[in-house]
Structures are given as C-alpha cells and as structure tokens.
Image (spheres, rainbow, N blue to C red):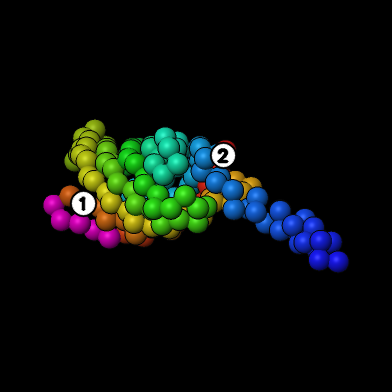
Amino acid sequence: MKRASLVILMVLLLPVASLLAQSRAESPNDFSLELGGKCILYSLSYQRMIGEMVGLEVGASYFGGASEGTNAGIFFLSGGARFYLTKKNASPCLAAGIVYVSAGTDAGPFGSDSESGVYFYASPGFEYRMSGGFLFRGSVNFLIKNGFFVWPGLTLGIAF
C-alpha cells in the first residue's frame, strides 16, 4: 500500500517539478513590451541570456504627432544588462544601462531642429517566467542625468 501511494504521489508531483524548470536556461531569448520604464512611456525590448544569471537587452521606443504641416517626435534607443539574483523562475533582478534620446520638430520657429542626448538607468525589480513562456516583470527605474528621476515600469513578454 505504501509503495502504491508513493508511486501515485510521484506521478502527481512530476508535472509540478517541470513548472520549476530553469526556463531562463531553456528559453534564453525574450521579447517584451514595457509600459513606463526606462523609455518613459513604453518600449519594445529583446533580451538574450548570456549565462544563467545575466542577460543583455536592447530596446526602442518612438512617439510623436503632427498637425497642419508640423510634426514632432521622440525616439529612444536603450541597451544594458540584467542581473538575476537567483536561478529560479521567480527572481529579483537588477538592470542597468544607457538610453539614447533624439527629439525633433519642425513646429513654429524651430524649423527642422533636433536635439539628442543620453541618460543612464538603474532598475531593481522582480521577474517571473512561466514554463509556457509568459514573462512578467515589475521594476522601479532610476533615470540618471544631472540628478535622478524615479519612474515605475511594468513588463509583459514572451520567452522563447
């Protein structure tokens, strides 16, 4: 009777063990949409794991508008690294990197002027990756240039 109970217990717990698999190692790529975050409004990002605990990320964002022959736009390009504190699917993490910003307008007296610059970011957060590939990450972003600005970020994505 004990042996039969043990076999039944193992059969029931085996699928649960697969949920605890190291999905960052199995699916080292992810594509995500971050709302808020390092690019202020949103960003589309790609991350590639270069080890079990470190990933490199690149992202981009653009928003703009136009009215009666004038237009304006802001382009963000970000790059950095993310460090995970544990090897589990649910892990605290720390990201850091640089963001290039380019803004341009031809409205009013500005002609076709544009400006560009860079700022740095540091983002402590928490990430959860499901074994099916869904990714959720929450972070607090410290945007650093002549002081710092604190901005929240919520990321949803897919790992593959």
Q: Residue at x 71, y 53 (%)?
A: 15
Q: Magenta stretch: residue 149 in it?
A: yes
Q: Amino acid at mark 2?
A: Glu
Percent position (x, y) of residue 17? 65, 54
* Res. 151 image quadrant: bottom left
Between label 2 and label 1, give the one nearer the viewer.
Answer: 2
**Label 1: element kind:** strand
Report the residue that reaches farthest toward the front. 2
The Cα atoms of the two marked residues, 2 and 1, are separated by 34 Å
Amino acid type for the residue under numbered disc 1: Ile
Say left or right for 139 vs 24: left
Query: Are the residues at dot 2 and dot 1 in contact (C-beta closer than 8 Å)?
Result: no
Query: Few, some or many C-alpha atoms within 10 Å of disc 1 (few <14, some 14-19, many ≥20)?
Result: some
Q: Earlier in the sequence, mark 2 or mark 1?
A: 2
Looking at the image, which is closer to me, 92 or 104? Answer: 92
Q: Quadrant of residue 101?
A: top left
Q: Residue at x 25, y 53 (%)?
A: 143
Query: What kind of secondary structure does the magenta stretch mostly adopt?
Result: strand
Disc ID at residue 5 = none
User: How many residues crowd mark 2 within 10 Å: few (<14), some (14–19), many (20+)?
Assistant: few
Q: Which residue is mark 2?
A: 26
Whether residue 85 is visible to the viewer of this picture, yes or no, is yes
* Residue in the foreground of this view, choosing between 147 and 73: 147
Q: For the N terminus, which image quadrant?
A: bottom right
Horizontal side, residue 24 vs residue 141: left or right:
right
Span shown in magenta: 146-150
The circle on residue 144 is: 1
Report the front residue among 135 and 25: 25
